[in-house]
Image (tube, rainbow, N blue to C red):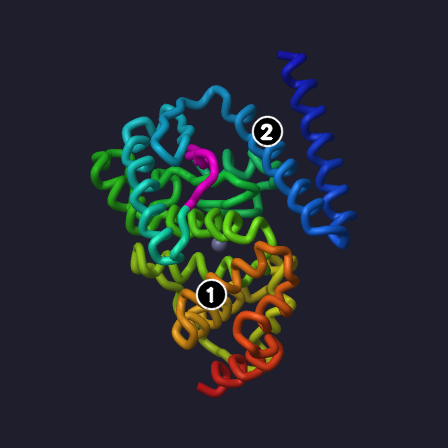
Amino acid sequence: MQIQSLLFKILIIVIMLVLFVCVSMSNYSHSIRKTVYRMFQKGTLLVLEYQTSDFDTVESNNFELKYTKNDEDIAICVLKMAEEYLIRAEKLLEFRHKKDKVLLVLFEDEKALNKSFGWSGDKSAVGVYWAGSIRLVSPRAWADEDLEDADTEKIEEIFRRNGPLSHELTHFLIDEMTEGNYPRWLTEGLAQYVEEKITGFTLNEPLFVSEDRVYLFSKLNSDFDNKPDQVMAYWQSFEIVRALIKEFGMEKMDELLDELRRGTKFNQAFERTYNIYFCDYEEKFLQEVTLS
Ligand SMILES: [Zn+2]
């Protein structure tokens, strides 16, 4: 056990070093960045596999699901749902997933998910896509109603309707499509676009959409989670993606994602795809949403 713990610590140090190299080389060639990014994903997956080594596992064509005894009754259903949603998300995004099986982990509660990241208790999420794998929280922990005596079908229905699976799966696909080269607002917008089509869920519009409340999209990348108005950050990300798809179609969105995959910086990729400067499109978009 002590050796395992030591190996785990070494792995964490290696990952931190790789991350450091990744950040320091971000201005170097695209191929170096991609290689380092893949190494980082592999390292993160190894750590997650280690952290969940006592979980049960079930596999399908495209997924490996790890779960605890708490959720053994819904594991097969979650796996089938993942396969179904993957097909639907691929169809919407006009893209086929080509890589290895995706690791899904179903944690018993938010605390267990947070612990897998080393987060303190104040962060809260019921689903997270991170570095090639998807972490989910059991619906037993987040459903509005008490599920202690509920039958399996009821729990599955709640997970299908309100669960974060379609949203997180889209993040996974966008990461694969662009090889990690995308602004955060773009993946959040697309995840909500696919989620709405699959589950019907959509965020309410913020109460006040005014010039002094909306964010510039350049401010919604690395700092997305720290923005004080999270509803606004998610809502405007969804709205701009919806506007782009409505105006130019998914084909053009795929062209943009393909341009990003080649390592082109976002503003340049946008200009090449849509023949418009992003700053001009952004200005027009923000004007329209604040006036309406
Ligand atoms: Zn998201």
Q: Can you say whether 256 is above or below 142 in the image?
A: below
> Which residue is under mark 2?
47
Give, as a single range, the part of the protein colored magenta: 97-108
Q: Is residue 12 left or right of residue 166?
A: right
**Residue at image x 49%, y 63%?**
255
Q: Can you say whether 110 is above or below 205 in the image?
A: above
Q: Amino acid at mark 1?
A: Met
Q: How many residues crowd mark 1 within 10 Å: few (<14), some (14–19), many (20+)?
A: many
Q: Amino acid at mark 2?
A: Val
Can you tell which of label 1 and label 2 is closer to the viewer?
1
Q: Can you say whether 66 is above or below 194 in the image?
A: above
Please tell me whether mark 1 sits on a helix, a strand or a loop: helix
User: Percent x, y for residue 89?
Assistant: 36, 52
Location of residue 84 (image quadrant): top left
> Which residue is under mark 1?
253
Quarter placement of the N terminus: top right
**Residue at image x 40%, y 64%?**
203
- Sequence order check: which comes first, mark 1 or mark 2? 2
Please tell me whether mark 2 sits on a helix, a strand or a loop: helix
**Residue 103: in sight, yes or no?**
no
User: Percent x, y for residue 15?
Assistant: 69, 34
Quarter placement of the C terminus: bottom left
Residue 137 colored magenta? no
- The total of numbered circles placed on residues is 2
The extreme right residue here reads 24
**Residue at image x 65%, y 23%?**
8
| Mark 2 CB lies closer than 8 A to ligand 1 | no
